[in-house]
Amino acid sequence: MEQLNKNIKLVSKKNSRVILPNILTLIGVCIGLSSIKFAFDGKFELSIIAVIVAGIIDGLDGRIARLIKGTSKVGKELDSLTDVISFGVAPAFIMYFWALSELGRLGWLISLIYVVCVALRLARFNVSSEGDSSWRDNFFEGIPSPAGGILVLMPLIFSLSEFKFLNINYQLIVPILFITISFLLISKIPTYSLKKIVVPRSTTIFLLFGVILYFGLVLVYTFNTIIISGVIYLLMIPVSAFHFYMIQKNSKTNNNEIDHHEDVL
């Protein structure tokens, strides 16, 4: 009887570490689905905010799981399913209700292409993440799905921002942006992941100040800040690709030098 009680306690303790991250992930699912309902009701501001909140939760659940040692295969698959809903299906529906529906069948086809690319990108990520860790872990292949979900919403966010000085043809820009982001999702262009970034202790206070300042700007100038962040992210893609190829080139050079040295010995 005592042995049975010990086993039950051990299982409960282990499961308790897994439950919290999975609960956060499921909350992300609910928020992602709610963003579709907001868009259907014409509340596009709330739908955008819901997708952003889902993105914040997506960034937290995995880190919390690793922090409390509550990672699991179920959590990994659940996280991918959540990403498809929150950053694939939800943005596609939001933009379809807002602009793509006016293109008829072509608009629906563009929405489908985007969702399929999100699913393919996540499937590739799940397979590649099972490999050995290396300096490549600092980069994604293509843009991550949360970034893609925000980027395809940029025309809608722009229309709600205070940047009214540009006259944009949304019927032209939205389809082009959807196709471009779909390509970037399934491409192998290296982009920064920032997963294993190392911050010197001496600069921690400045990092915290920067994070607080950024979220303060998001709270006060929500749509303006998101637009600027999106533009900066797009400009960083060629920078990250160049950085990756330089690291790759240096790594190959060092390996060749080691092999040559071993041959000499």
Image (spheres, helix red, strand yellow):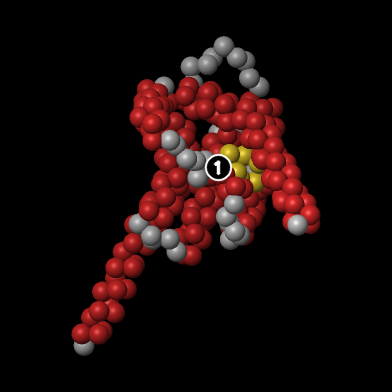
Left or right position of 19 against 151: left
Q: Name, please, the residue furthest toward the left.
A: 2
Question: Is residue 196 or residue 90 the one in the foreground?
Answer: 196
* Amino acid type, callout 1: Ser
Q: Is mark 1 on a helix, strand or loop?
A: loop
Residue plotted at (55% across, 51% down): 84
Residue plotted at (58% across, 26% down): 231
Q: Name, please, the residue furthest toward the front.
A: 265
Residue holding disc 1: 193
Image x and y of residue 149, in percent? 55, 40
Left or right position of 265 against 174: right
* Observer able to see residue 21: no
Residue plotted at (20% across, 85% down): 2
Question: Is residue 202 or residue 146 the one in the foreground?
Answer: 202
Question: Is residue 239 or residue 17 the one in the foreground?
Answer: 239
Q: Name, please, the residue furthest toward the bottom.
A: 1
Residue plotted at (75% across, 57% down): 265
Image x and y of residue 23, in percent? 36, 56
